[in-house]
Image (cartoon, rainbow, N blue to C red):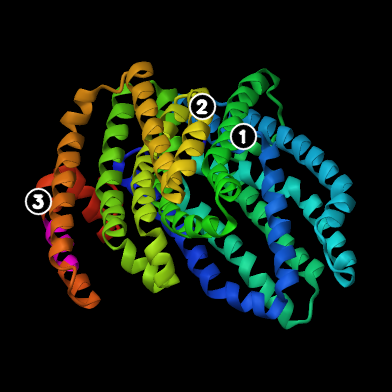
Amino acid sequence: MAKNSYKMQPFFIARGVIFNFVGQIIPIFVGIVSTPIIVHDLGIERFGLLTISWTVLGYFSILDFGLGQAATKFVSEVLGKRESIISQIIWTILAGQFILGFIGTAILYSIVPFLVRILNISNDLLGEAKDTFYLIAFSVPLVIISTSLRGVLEALQRFDLVNLVKIPANISLFLMPLIGVRYGFNLTKIVALILLTRIAVLLVFAFLIIYFLPEIKYFSIYFEIFPRLFTFGGWITIARVVGAILAYSDRFLIGSLLSVNEVAYYTAPFEMVTKLWIIPSSFAITLFPAFSSLKGNGDDYKINELFCISLKYLLIIQWQVILLIILFSREILQIWLGMEFSQKSTFLMQILALGVLFSSVAHIPSYFLQGIGRPDITAKFYLLELPIYFLTNWFLIKNFGIAGAAVAWTLRAFLDVGLLFGASFKIYQVLPRLLINNGVFSIVFTLLAVSAMAYSLKIFVNGFPLWVKMLIFAIFFSAFGYFSWKKLLNSSDKKIVLKMIMKREGL
């Protein structure tokens, strides 16, 4: 069994959320700062090849067949049951990942000549591009196996260690090109540097797992679990593929029904508001192993309690961020992209932000259902939504342009969150009364009232200078923060927050 005790208290869940949020936000900031320098030093064509190579690797990483998430699920469940088959499960998953990674390498290696031909690469970069894609092909098993190793650490709730490894690894995607250019490396050598960091990441993850789970030193395959692993992972894969189609098919419809220019007016605000998914995904990454472990332990009460508490925290945080985006969409777009985007994209950015709120809330029931072993539900809902969304999107784009696309996407997000909550209520009996008892409904009504007041205030201050508006709303949201502390959070919530601030251990 693991050397560390498995922490299921709300404090450790909250701490995990913070670690995961920081682990996602730091590389984003590094990327924003370093990308212009990389483009300038590497050149447009080489930078394009670099981004295409990582896109290709991202597509081939789907060949992990959901086993990375399965590692988190099944190891967490075994920890909850306190069974002694963790080593067999991990080795079984790693064996499956190695086979799938080898298949991915063989496929990608064989299509490299075709890939290079269709990309319209200049003659002087053809050899460099081909060597780069060959390197990417050999990296597929590294990436897939690292995903499973990371999943095991997440099952142990060691998000501090996961992010201590993940942050430098993600930063290296931007740092290595800068180092390579400085020393006159071509693209192939720069990618080789990045792959060396991936090998280092894999070795560090392996070392940490051996430290916490010494029994993994002994190789053992658990063939009986193969069907369960691949069934679980298969549904995860279906959900990912269909989810990607649901997320990005709108821009293809806009491009075909309207114009490529309209795609730009739609995509820019879409990419900005969907960056806010890092908040719910930080919750989801943390909650998934917690739900899995509690399911293994058979603790239905704590599962329901964790569901309600997580939903409450997410609503308080994400709703305020989305509200600010909706209120200041025009100003944000004008400062970021100019007056033309502000005039064309303000309304659709507001609609998309509302959709992001719905999809953010959907993270809780989605990962709850996956954690209790029902990933098929999310995948089936996506398959159900796909034709409905496509037809709705086509009709609204045809009649209302890019604003119609935003409305269709938001309606689909609303349908999705409704279906997932309905499934949670019916399948695992997360009862609405528990949401009432934990203050979730009262928080929703309070946030609706605050939104109405904020909207009225925005109308009142509309003619003021931007700095005055910012000052007024800083005071407004500070007052709401004080109200939330006094009225919306109970004594247990306040204790968790204070512990996070004071960094103390133990409740």
Residue pointed to by mark 3: 486
Q: Is residue 325 above or below residue 90?
A: below
Using residue 357 as the reference point, say whether residue 103 is left or right of it: right
* Dot 3 or dot 2, earlier in sequence: 2
Using residue 172 as the reference point, say whether residue 53 is left or right of it: right
Residue pointed to by mark 2: 375
Q: Residues within 10 Å of mark 1 (few under 14, many from 20)?
A: many
* Dot 3 or dot 1, earlier in sequence: 1
Q: Residues within 10 Å of mark 3 (few under 14, many from 20)?
A: few
Tell me the SS state at disc 3: helix
Q: CA distance from mark 3 to mark 1?
A: 43 Å
Q: Residue 446: within the magenta?
A: no
Q: Residues within 10 Å of mark 2 (few under 14, many from 20)?
A: many
Of the pair 351 and 234, the residue shown nearer to us:
351
Q: Nearer the viewer, mark 3 or mark 2?
A: 2
Label 2 near label 1: C-beta < 8 Å?
A: yes
Q: CA distance from mark 1 to mark 2?
A: 10 Å
Q: Quadrant of the C terminus?
A: top left
Residue pointed to by mark 1: 66
Q: Is residue 154 above or below residue 35?
A: above
In the rendered structure, which amino acid carries the disc numbered 2? Pro
> Percent position (x, y) of residue 163?
50, 56
* Dot 1 or dot 2, earlier in sequence: 1
State the extent of the magenta-drawn residues as a range.
Answer: 473-482
